Amino acid sequence: MRILLVEDESHLAAQLRQTLEEAGYVVDTAGNGRDAWQLGGEQTYDVVVLDLGLPVLDGLSVLKRWRSEGMVTPVLILTARDQWHEKVAGIDAGADDYLTKPFHTEELLARVRALIRRAQGLASPVLQCGAVSLDTRSNRVTRDGHPVAMTSHEYKVLAYLMHRPNTVVSRTELTEHIYAQDFDRDSNTIEVFVARLRKKLPPAMIETVRGMGYRLVVP
């Protein structure tokens, strides 16, 4: 899962990026509204965490531009404790949720997980596909109740597919969502990760759709 983090306070941005990456997310960052607007229009994200008090172009204006341009990515806005009117304006402009500063990182992660689930019509933080369970809170995968060891990239590929059951996902889409913007991406490595996953998962759970990509088959 790939997140755009927009925060101009460098120390907080570094903290949040580390927290999100340790939780298994791929994170791109922007420190001002102009860069955020451009990234949001050029790249595909699963969630945007957007501070409203940004230089160059304020967060509310960025959000309004995104929505007017048809961007449907879930957006979590960050607001100051005493700026209640910003929350209202943010929700009216198209935000999906808000978090008031200061906040606990555990709450940020919980809200991010909820937005990703909601975007795919999923309710539980534990994703199930037959004998395989993936707990988005702990990044733990089990098969028939037994832990399944995975590398970070294997987990990211499986998590992305399990958030989109019975949906064909292209290799390009997977590549975009498991690598950060500044990473040297290679879509051919997706085949390697899928091959490794197939050895750890039930047979035929990940189906190859010729010329299109992969599909997670729900029993």
Image (cartoon, rainbow, N blue to C red):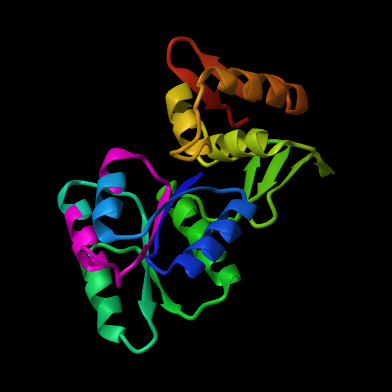
Magenta region includes residue 107 = no
62 to the left or right of 198: left
The outermost residue toward the top is 210
Q: Is residue 61 something one can see in this rendering? A: yes
143 to the left or right of 101: right
The residue drawn where x is 61% and y is 48% is 24
Q: Nearer the viewer, residue 80 or 8?
A: 8
Q: Quadrant of the C terminus?
A: top right
The residue drawn where x is 51% and y is 44% is 1
Task: Give the magenta part as a residue range.
Answer: 40-65
In x, y percent, where is residue 193? Answer: 64, 25
Q: Nearer the viewer, residue 33 or 24?
A: 33
In x, y percent, where is residue 73? Answer: 34, 50
Residue 163 against residue 211 in the figure, above or below? below
The residue drawn where x is 57% and y is 23% is 190
The outermost residue toward the left is 68
The residue drawn where x is 30% and y is 85% is 84
The outermost residue toward the right is 146
In x, y percent, where is residue 113? Answer: 53, 57
Residue 188 against residue 117 in the figure, above or below? above
Q: Quadrant of residue 60?
A: bottom left
Magenta region includes residue 56 = yes
